[in-house]
Image (spheres, coloured by chain):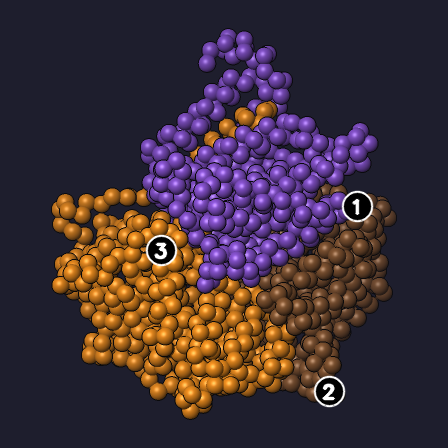
Chain colours: A brown, B orange, C purple
Amino acid sequence: MSFFLETLAGGLLAGVMYALVAIGFVLIYKASGVFNFAQGAMVLCAALTFVTLTERDVPFWLAGLITLAIMVTLAVAVERVVLRPLVNRSQITLFMATLGLSYIIEGGSQFVMGASVHELDLGISDLPVAIGPIQLSSFDLVAAASAGALVIALWLFFERTRIGVSLRAVADDPQAALSIGIRLPVLWATVWAVAGFVALVAGLLWGARQGVQFSLTFVVLKALPVLIIGGFTSITGAVVGGLIVGAADALAEIYLGPLLGGSVSTWFAYGLAVAFLLVRPAGLFGERAIERV
Amino acid sequence: MSRLSRVLGAAALAASLTAPFSLPSAAFAQEAGAPAAKQYIPLATYRVGAYASSGTPVWGGTIDYLRYLNEVEGGINGVKLTWEECETEWAVEKGVECYERLKGGRDGSPVPLFLPHGDPITKALTEKSAADKIPLLTTGYGRTEAIDGRVFPYSFTVLFSFWSEASSAINYIAEQVGGKDKLKGLKIATVYHDSPYGKETQVPLDLLAKTYGFENIQIAVPHPGNDQSAQWARIRQIKPDWVFLRGWGVMTPVAIKTAAKTGFPVDHIIGGIWSGSEEDVRPAGSVGKGYLAITPFPAGAEFGILKKIKAAIVDQGKSDLKDLKSFGSVYYNSGVIETIIAVEAIRTAQARFGKRPLTGEETQWGLEHLVLDEARLKELGADGLVQPLRLSIKDHEGGGAGKVLQWDGAKWNIVSKGWVKSDRELLLPVIYERAAAYAREKGITPRSEDTAEASAK
Amino acid sequence: MPPALAAALAPVRRPVLPALPVRAAGLALLLAVAFVAIPLTATDYWYNAILIPFLIMALAGLGLNLTMGYAGQASLGTGAFMAVGAYATYNLLLRLPELPLPVSLAGGGLIAGAVGLVVGLPSLRIKGFYLIAPTLAAQFLIEWVFNQVGWFSNYASSSAISAPRLVFLGYDLSSPAGRYALTLTSVSVVMVLAWRLVGSQTGRNWRAVRDGETAAAVIGVPVARAKLSAFFVGAAVSGVAGALWAFAYLGTVDARSFDLDRSFQAMFIIIIGGLSSLSGSFIGAAFIVLTPILLTHLSNALLGGSLDGGQISNLQRILFGALIIGFLIKEPNGLAALLGRLRHPAR
């Protein structure tokens, strides 16, 4: 039993890490209606910038600020140059455009900062911690706490501030939002900037876990089922979806993997997502009907 | 507008897109006039993409050694070397494109051999290279069955095949527990990258487990392997005595980190060839201390040839490395080792065919008659760096041993006593069987050993 | 062809194909180039690195275009269908050696089509962009199956499959020219079939479903059947492409040769080339397959020596991404439409 609990807890903590990436997707989807595949490249870019700076003895806080500034600039540029000309185009076209964008960001980051692997030490120890009968990692707990704090901050930002309310108005009906005087460019830029910030947090936590290297971009593949399960438009959904995917993956790998030959987690989350989609097309917390062609 | 006309237009556009391609020079006048002075060596590299971090130091070692040969030794027996890079991004179709583009040679020099750098690319080139008579040289990767040169005349899985890697790792564990008879009853878990490369050791480990009586546990990690909490939870449950880690890319640092946080002793994890570089361990941070790895590419800057390269190339600012920290690293040294083998094969072939740029067919002969014994390695300054090798038509591997390295938190130290040999006598019959099966499936008539022996005289 | 003759012949033809003889002449010319002129001049490099991958990816794009461009069913499972085609053809060649090569190829395609049909089942309930979820699930699941189940690769040590001898009617097709001939013939045959199909009632049903499902249902189009048939046909065409990719192009492949990147490539091909345009698949494939090669040649010529290989490759990646975005912005209907405007500026 304690083994089951431990697997579950480990999976849930991994799920928090997926949720962190998924939140970035949700923000941009809410504002621009695009599934931003370049979010993975943004995570890489943020982590690489940060670690390149700290390796040159820039203090953490300053490196964080500079990286954030770069991410915001990048986000605004993407919104201007790529997404605005593509407004009103099909979702799949937008999706493919962000795929092209990811080539640019990946190539650009590696062009400027090189392709080596960097170690990122955030000063958080990563050792086993016993909690009752189960054993967890101190780093994962800190990561979960950070993710929790981030979610609360975002929730406050989007529920309690004017810009958050505007965002919901835009997500509901862009035309109506425009007609009551919401300035879309400002709104878009803000949301993309916040998404850049989320990418930085995700990049730092993932980077500390696995080293800062190209494969950070692969985290997006796990974010898609998270979003389908949680709904594309809900931050809460992203978190819950992340937890479900993390736990399901871990349990499937342990209990199903040996029966089927292992590595079931490559597709299990997607299978689960399809099941959710068939039963509840809008996702657990999604707002919009899916019959949108 | 009709569809047909658009098809037509499509062809026109396609044609205009391809128009700027120049046809590569296919034929060169080998017999006419003076032979080209320089031996051309194409380099398939991956400096971008997911694996660039491991590739970049390899080309550093390769190019630095080639530069050293040209500048200090005047090439190979006076034949200078020239090379050209082609980016593959480790992707198979790009690798094929590179091979096709470069195989024609350059400036009158044919291609003596091709280093595909990547397991999938190697597989895709196996037959093409045999048809073109260009040897594929793969060190520490490539088809294990290609050890049988009777079936695979142009594939050279030199040094340390994946099967030998597995066997040497088991033999190192045997050394640690006090002999092969003590392996009985041990639990040895292999945590592998779930890809053809990762699964390659399942057959030999199965055989070794049956022979020595240890328990063989196989745990797959799906690509890319950036979350392994489930796999290591299973390991915590099974409690194996040793873990053999066969990772690739990001999978290795994540495995080490996850092992540490689930409380598995890192000094009982033995990484395989592609889990045993600085680039694999450094991102894991301080918890990587004590981690082991078996490799045919020992790290260190104190080998004779490395000192020479340092003095003549690196210290002169002529190194290909951007980050000199990588000098003497596992991957840097792998580039040097691979190039030493390639160059010595060319040298061997030159002794028979003359001191001029060689063709693939001639170099194939050189490879199959390559002998790098202790004395020759000492001459090269590569003793301890390159294991003694003796290749033949029946043995395209030649060595089959690795050294075990241990990470001390900042660098690798060699902890095995010399080279840890694999049980080749146990594995070779199975390998020959598999090669024969391949020959049957493909309708290949294996070369007979006698003809090769005759040509050797 | 004299204009008078063309005019005389034109009215006989179906109205969808005005001035057919001119086009027929053009098509004949194109086929003559592809079947005669190229084999007379091409080198190994042209066959192995350019022509064969271009034709195969065009075919894969064509498969996706039938499903997505004509019938409006988004799919990121092209790579998986290609894998099914490759592994199915391999097993047919291996286990039923008496079957001639074209039959095995077609059989591989049909098996891929059947798998596509199953993958398409959720399309009866899920619409639009969200359809990429089940097709992605298929993409990962199928890659995993071929990696896990040894039977499909005849228990090869690394689950890689390699082409048995390619022989047809006593001709050995394993030379570059032979593999090109095999590819070109397969692509031509499939192209003709696809062209017939999109002009048929099935094709009209597909377009009706794409343009408005409810309306289509009202006028009596069998919507479910149209969707599933689109998945079946698209996957079958992609399956043939996969078999050719494995045996006519690479020779030896494993499941990862058909990973998500391949699906993305097919998607790029049809979006950049042109949705619901048969020629668009070829134009898109030319762009996606050839641009990186072209960039390599150009940058080697322009920048060779001044930057190291890694920097050049990163620049190429940036440029490739920028070109993709540029074309997506400038050409909503794909390069096929651009080409159409170039040929008929008045329209």
What is the chain identity of the residue bearing mark 2?
A: A
Of the residues shown, which amino acid type is indicated by label 3?
A: Ala
Distance between mark 2 and mark 3 Cα atoms: 56 Å
Q: Indicate the position of residue B137 as horizontal and vertical percent values.
A: 32, 62
Q: Amino acid under label 1? A: Glu
Q: Chain of mark 3?
A: B
Identified at 77% across, 57% down, the residue is A276
Q: Are marks 1 and 2 on the same chain?
A: yes
Q: Secondary structure at mark 2?
A: loop
Q: Tag 2: residue type?
A: Pro
Task: Work out whether residue B104 can be spotted.
Answer: yes
Q: Is B336 drawn above or below residue A106 in the view shown?
A: below
Pick whichever of labels 1 and 2 is earlier in the sequence.
Answer: 2
Location of mark 2 (residue): A133
What residue is rendered at 73% in x and 35% in y?
C209
Q: Please give the residue where the numbered disc 3 appears in the rendered image.
A: B439
Residue drawn at 63 percent across, 30 percent down: C198
In this picture, is B232 found above or below C57? below
Find residue C57 and name its label.
none
Q: Secondary structure at mark 1?
A: loop
Q: Secondary structure at mark 3?
A: helix
Expressed as whole percent of the image width and height from the top left, the position of residue A56 reads: 52, 75
Task: Tell me: A98 left or right of B182.
Answer: right
The residue indicated by pointer 1 is A291
Point out the residue furthest to the bottom here. Answer: B178
Mark 1: few, some, or many residues within 10 Å (few <14, many ≥20)?
Answer: few
Quadrant location of the C terminus of chain C in the rendered image:
top right
Q: Mark 2 Cα within 10 Å, few/some/many (few <14, many 20+)?
A: few
- From the viewer's perspective, is B421 left or right of B251? left
Q: Nearer the viewer, residue B86 or C19?
A: C19
Q: Are marks 1 and 3 on the same chain?
A: no
Between marks 1 and 3, how big is the CA–CA gap?
A: 55 Å
